[in-house]
Amino acid sequence: MTKKNDIKFLRVTHLRGPNIWTYRPVIEVWLDLGELEECPSNTLPGFTDRLTAWLPGLVEHRCGVGERGGFIERLRDGTWAGHILEHVVLELQNLAGMKTGFGKTRSTGEHGVYKMAFRTRDEVVGRAALEAGHALLMAAINDTPFDLPATVARLTDLVDRYCLGPSTAHIVDGATDRRIPSIRLTEGNLVQLGHGAAQRRIWTAETDRTSAIGEGIASDKDLTKTLLASCGVPVPEGAVARSAGQAWEEAQYIGLPVALKPIDGNHGRGVSLNLMSEADVVAAYAIAAEEGDSKSVLVERFIPGNEHRLLVVGRQVVAAAKGESLWVTGDGRQSVIALCDSQINIDPRRGESEEFPLGTVKPHESDEIKLDLKRQGLTPDSVPQAGQKVLIQLNGNVADDVTDLVHPSVAHAAALAARIVGLDIAGIDLVCEDISRPLEEQRGAIIEVNSSPGLLAHIKPASGAPRKVGKAIVDHLFEEGENGRIPVVGVTGTLGTSLIARLVGCLVHIGGKHVGVANGEGLYLDARQVSSRDSTGFEAGQRLLINRTVQTAVFESNARSILSQGLPYDRCAVGIVTDMEGLDDLAEFYIRDDDAMRNVIRTQVDVILPEGAAVLNAANEAVAALAALSDGRVIFYAADENNAVLARHRAAGGCVVFLRGGRVVLAEGAEETPLLELAKMKPSTVKHPENVLAAVGAAWALGVPADLICGGLRAFDATRKKANG
C-alpha cells in the first residue's frame, strides 16, 4: 500500500469555557486531511483491524449509532480521518486514566478541512494526547510500528503531574453533582468551589474552614492526647521522651509492649509498634526522632488489635476503613524484598501514584520494616526458610471499608476527638479488636488525630463499598439549597454591549451589592475602573469570579471571544443578546453564513440557568428566535411597544421592556410599571435607548426594585473613565 501523506494541524485552541461545542472545556483542532479526504476508513486495507488491535477499547465508543460497537461499525462502513482521530485521542486519554467521552468533528465547508473538538480535563495532557493520537492514526493508516505501552505510560505520567489528584477530583465531582462550579487556582490541588462571595476553597481534604490552630494541635501528639483524655476520650497511656534512655525508662514504667512515634509526626510516619525489648525501643527512638521535626518522641502503651481510620467531616463519621497486618511466606529461595514483590506488591490495589488505595511495600527503604525484620532475626536481603511466616508490617494498609460496622459510641468518640482538636475534617486513627463494639469493652483507644486526611482508602477501598466522601465534604461546606453561585450576567453582541454591561453593574450596585464588570472598556469593581484593558477574555473574567468580595458579576462577550476562548463562566443567571452582526469579521473561523453565526451567539443563551432569564432584542428577528433555546424565562425588549414579538409575548403573560412617550416601562402581561423618563437620564446614557432597555431588563430579572432601577438610571454616567492598567 502506498503511504498516505500526513494530516496537517492548521490551528489548535484550548477553549476553556462554554463554547460552540459544549458547556465544558475542549481542545479544538482545525485539520487539513489532504489526500486522506479521498480515503475513508473502508478504503484502507487492514486499517480497522490494526487500529482496534491497538485500541480494543474503541468498541465501547457508541458514536452516532448510539450503541456499543457503534464507532467500529462506522469504521467498517467508512468514516473520515478527522472523525477517527477524535475517537483515538479520547481513548488514549481514557487509557491514561483521564476519563473523557465528548468529541465532535464537523466539516468547515472547505475541501478536506475539518474542525474537530474533544473534551479534556487538562490542556497539557490534551495536547499531548492529540499528538500521540495523530502519530498512532498515521501508523495505523500506513501500517508502520507504534509503541502504545510507552505512549500510554508517558500520558499517564502527564495525568499524574498535571491533573487534580484523585481525592481532590472526587470532591470536585461531588460539587459538580450539586451544580456547584469550580475553579482550579494553582497547578496543584487548591480549588475554589463556587464563585465570588459565595465561594469556598479546598486543598484536598483541607478547607477554608480548617483551623490552623487545630492543625497545629493535631501535629503535637502529646498535646492532642492530653486534650482528648481531659474530655474522656480513650487514649493510650504514654509519656514524652527526649532520649533513647528516657524512652526505655518510660517503656518500663508504662509496661511492655509499647509503641513509639514522633511527637510532631503525621499519617503514621516514623511509628514503631509492639516493642518488647530495650534494643527495640532504642532503635525505634532513632526512627521516630529522625522522622519528626523535634527530637521528642511519644512512648505509649501498645494496644493490640487492628488499626482503623475513621473520617470525620463536620460533626459526623462518614467513612471508616480497617487495616491488616502484612506477612510473607518464605520459599527458601527468594529474599524478603523479592517475597514482598511476588506476594504483596503484585496486588493490583498497590502502586506508586495516588490512584492506588495501597502503597508499594519497599522493605529496603523503610526503617520501620527493617526494625520489625531485625526483631525476627532478618534483614530485607535475608532468605527466609520454606514455609517461614515473616511479619512485614503489623499495622497500616488501612484500606478495607467497615463504615457500616462502626458502633455508635465509637463514631461519637471519633467525632468528639475531631471537635476537641478543632478540625472540621479529620482522620481519626484508633486501634481495637472489633469496631462494632464500644472501645471501653476491649481496651481500644484513639491513637492519632490527623489533619488533611487521605481519602483514597474510602474512595477506592481494597474491599467493601466506596464511600461518597467528596459529597460529604461538599455538603459540609454548602448548606442544602446553596449552590456556590453569585448572579452572573452575560452580554453578547455588538450594539452597545460595553455600555449595557456597565449599566447593569450600576443598577445592581445601587442596591448595595458589590459588583464586578468585565467588558471591552476594562475591569470595574463597584463602578471603579481598575483596568482599562479589554477584559472580554477568559482570564479577565476569572479575576471577577475568584474575587471574594464580588456578589454579582457582569461580563461582555462577543462572537470572537466565544470562538477563541469560550465564555469565562459556566452558567449565568441572565443572558443578554443584542444582535448577530459582525459576520464579516469571522471569516478566519470559517463562520461564513447566518446559521454559523447563530450557532456561535446561541452559546450565550445555552448557558442560562433554569431559574434565570434571557433578555433578548425583540426588534432583531434572529435574536428573538433564540428565545426557544432558553432554559429560563424570557424578557423581550424593544423601543416600540407595538413590536409584534413584544405584543405576542406580553399577550401570553410574558415580561417585556419598552418605551412609551419617552419613558421606560416594564410590563408583565397586563400589569405595567412605569420607570424613569429618558429626559431625566444623562445624554450619554440615552444616545441609544435600546441599550437602556436591555440593562433594565437584566436588572428586573435580577430582582432589583423599580425605585432603585430609577435611581440607577438617573445616576449612571456613560462617559468612559480612564484607569491605569
Image (cartoon, rainbow, N blue to C red):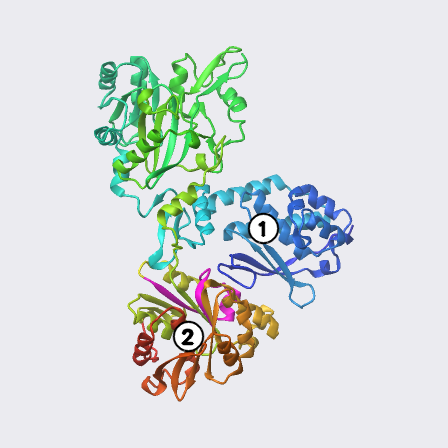
Q: Is residue 55 visible?
A: yes
Q: Which residues are magenta?
A: 550-576
Q: Position of residue 113 (x, y in %)?
A: 66, 64
User: What residue type is disc 1 on?
Assistant: Gly
The structure residue drawn at horizontal position 35% and vertical position 52%, both measured from the top left corner, is 200
- Closer to the camera: disc 2 or disc 1? 2
Give the numbered dot on residue 693: none
Q: In the image, is residue 646 part of the stretch drawn in magenta? A: no
Distance between mark 2 and mark 1 Cα atoms = 38 Å
The structure residue drawn at horizontal position 36% and vertical position 55%, both measured from the top left corner, is 199
Nearest the eye: 208 or 190: 208
Can you identify the residue that label 2 sits on? 697
Q: For this view, does 624 lie left or right of residue 520?
A: right
Can you identify the residue that label 1 sits on? 101
Q: For this view, does 450 lie left or right of residue 468?
A: left
User: What residue type is disc 2 on?
Assistant: Gly
Quadrant of the image occupied by residue 21 = bottom right
The structure residue drawn at horizontal position 49% and vertical position 18%, both measured from the top left corner, is 328
Q: In the image, is residue 575 part of the stretch drawn in magenta? A: yes
Nearest the eye: 45 or 143: 45
As displayed, is residue 461 above or below residue 259?
A: below
Q: For this view, does 111 lie left or right of residue 193?
A: right
